[in-house]
Image: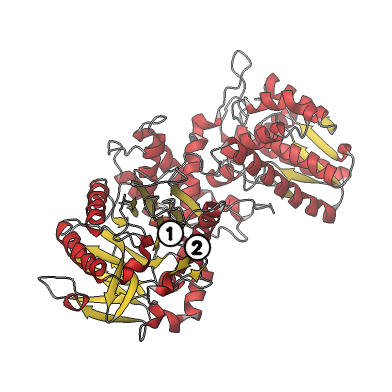
Amino acid sequence: MFDFYRVATCVPDLKVGDVIYNKESILKKVKLAYENGANLIAFPELALTGYTCGDLFFQDNLIKSVKTALKDILDETCEINAAIIIGTPLFVSGQLYNTAVVMVNGKIRGVNIKTFLPNYNEFYEKRWFSSASDIPGNNFNLNMSDLGIPSEDDYLVLLGNNIIYDYAGEFKFGVEICEDLWSPLPPGVWQTLAGAEVMVNLSASNETIAKRDYRRSLVKNASASNLCEYLYVSAGSSESTQDLIFSGHSILCENGTVLNENKDFIANDYIMLADMDLGRIRSDRIKGKTFKDTAGLYKDRISDMVTVYIDSDVKPESDGKYYIISSRPFIPASKAKRVKRCRDIFDMQVGGLAKRLSVTGGKLVVGVSGGMDSTLALLVCAETLKKLNKPSTDLIGITMPAFGTTDRTYNNALLLIKSLGAELVTIPIKDACLQHFKDIGHDESIKDITYENTQARERTQVLMDYANKVGGIVVGTGDLSELALGWCTYNADQMSMYGVNASIPKTLVKWMIESVVENQMFKDSTVVLRDIIDTPISPELLPPDEFGEISQKTEDSIGPYELHDFFLYYIMRYGFSPSKIFYMAKKVFHDTYDNATILKWLKTFYQRFFTQQFKRSCMPDSVKVGSVCLSPRGDWRMPSDASFKLWIDEVEKLKPEEEIIHG
C-alpha cells in the first residue's frame, strides 16, 4: 500500500553444527515474522549451520544435513508468501560455497554466492569456501536434483552473484553476503544500478570496540550512494565464542538514514520488524541523474545482471505501521540535534547575507513587526554585522504600526531592536493608508483584501525608500511556508533585496529563535525573544479585539502550519500523491486533528500552492538551507498557469472516515 513494504531480520538461537536444531529455530522465526506481515525475511550468514563451524564444513555429514534441512524448510513454507533469505553452505558441482538461498512459497528462486572471502586475522573463509568469482561466467543454472535437494518438481535454479529478484512487479531486491559490503566495489553496486531497490546483506560480523559504529556507517553509506534500502542482519551471540563474540547486529537504512536498528549491543534470538517506503527511493532515483548516468556509463557490466521474476498470488505490501513518520519533518526530534541543526541553518543564513552585503555594501533595513519571521531576520542581520565587524547601528529596524498593530507586538518590536543595539525608526502608516483609500475610492470601513494589502504594500514602499535614503538593502522576512501558500502580498512582503528566511518553514522559525536563546547569542534579548515565541501568528492587518488583543490569526484563515509544512515536505521532497499524503497525515496527526480537518486543509494547500506560483516566479535571491526550496532559479520550476484539477480531483475522492493506521 502506497509503496510500503515490511521486512524482518531474524537472528535465531542456534547451536553450532546442529542443523536440525537450527532449522527448527529458523522456521519458528519465519512463521512469526510472516504473521507480523513481513514481505521479506532475512537470516544471518550461514545461519543454518552456524558461521563458526570451522573445519566442520569439510564434514560430509554436515553438508548432507544442510540439503535435507533446506528440503524441510521448503515444505514448511510453501504457504508463506514472503521472500525468505537464509544463509547456508552449499555443495555445488564439486565446490563448497557460502550462499544466501532465496525462497518463496516453498520454491528456491535463486542462490546468491559470496564473492569476497576474508582470509586474514581470525577469518579463514578461503580455507573452506570458493568464491562466486570462481564460477565460469557470472552464474550457472542447475536443477534441484543437481543441487542435491530432494524435490517433486525438478525445476531450474540460478546461482551466482549477479542476480536481481523482481518480487511480483512490486519491488526488486538484491543480495550480498558480509565481506561483499566491505570491498571497494561490492556486488550490490551492480545490482542496484541494474534496478534493485533493496539490498539485503547476510552477515556474520564479530563485535569489537567501535566496530558497531563503523558497520553502521558502511550500511548508511551504501544505502546513500546506491539510492536504496539496505537491510543488514548479522549472526547472534549463540555462535561459538572460542575466539570471537558475535552481536546479532540488525539495521535498515534508507538512502543514508537509519530507519530501524536493534537496541542491544550483544543480541540473540530476536526479530526486528521494519517498514520501507520505496516511494522515497523511487523519487530520489528519478531526480538523481548521477545515479542514472553511472548506470549508463557501466551498461556493459550491468548487462551481465540477471533478473529472476517471482510470481505471487498475493500482492506483497504493508500498511506502513512500522514506518516512523515525523509530524514535523523539517525539525529533528531530539533537542540536541534540533539546537545544532538550527544553529547550522542560522550560520548559513548569516553566511549568505554576509556575502551579499560584502558586494552591495551599505546598511541593512528590516521591517520589524514583533512577530517571529521578522525577529529571525533581524537576528540574522545583527549576527552578520558582528561577523563583518560592522557597527550594530548599521542595522535599521523599522516599525510601521497600522490598524491591526497591538501593544504587545509593537512593544516587543521596540524592545528587540533596542536590545540588539540597532537603530530604531518608527513610521506609522495609518494616515498614508487612509489617503490611499481616498485616492482609489475605497471605503475604509470595508475590511477586505484591499484594506489588508494596502497596508502590506505601504510598508514595503517605506522600507524600500528608506533603504534608498540610507544607502542600504531591504532584508526580507517571509518564510518558506508563506511562499508555498502564497500567504504574502504581491509586490509587498513578497519582495525584498535579499531574503534570509525564504527556505525556512514556519514550523522551524520558532525553533530557530529558540536555538538563538539556547546558545545565548544575544543575552540582552532573551526575555523579549521568549515573549515573541509565545505570540500568536498574525499579519495584524485587521483591528485588535475589544481587549486590545490580536483578532486576526493566520492559522484560522489558511489552516495549521504544522499540517501545511507536512504537506509541503512530502509534495516537494518526494512528489507523493494526495492519497498517500492524506494516509500518512492521518497516521501521525490522529491525536490532533480529525480526518475531515486534515482533508479540508490538504485541499486548501493544493489550491493555494498551484494558484500562487506567480509570486514565487519573481521571488528575490535567498539562501537555500535544506532539501526543500521554492526558488524559481533552481529548485522549483513550475508554470504559473498550471492546472490543479488532477490533484484536487484525487483529494475530493478521498473519504474522511477511512481507517487510520497508528504507528
Residue 81: x %, y % from top left: 21, 57
Labels in figure, total: 2
| Mark seen at residue 260 | none
Q: Is residue 296 visible?
A: yes
In this orientation, does residue 312 appear?
A: no
Circle 1: is it few (<14), some (14-19), or many (20+) Cα within 10 Å? many
Of marks 2 and 1, which one's residue comes earlier in the chain? 2
Instruction: Say which residue appears at 24% left-offset and 47% top-offset.
Output: 32
| Location of residue 97 by image quarter | bottom left
Q: Which residue is mark 2?
A: 222
Contact between labelled residues 1 and 2, with CB atoms less than 8 Å apart: yes
The correct choice, above or below, for 557 with respect to 135 in the image is: above
Circle 1: residue type? Tyr
Give the x, y percent position of residue 339: 64, 38
Front residue of 340/420: it is: 340
Q: Nearer the viewer, residue 190 or 375?
A: 190
Q: Amino acid at mark 2?
A: Ala
Residue 377 coordinates in the image, percent (x, y): 72, 40
Looking at the rendered structure, the secondary structure element under dot 1 is strand
Task: Give the Cα separation between the discs numbered 2 and 1.
Answer: 7 Å
Is residue 245 found left or right of 70 in the rendered image?
right
Question: Which residue, given by chain and number where applicable, does mark 1 sit on?
Answer: 230
Q: Residues within 10 Å of mark 2 (few under 14, many from 20)?
A: many
Residue 311, located in which quarter of the rendered image?
A: bottom left
- Kindly identify the residue that appears in the image at 44 percent across and 51 percent down: 247
| Viewer-closest of 263 and 426 | 263
Specify whether 96 is left or right of 494: left
Please tell me which residue is depicted at 41% across the width and 80% down the height of the picture.
133
Secondary structure category for the residue under label 2 = helix
Left or right: 80 in relation to 659? left
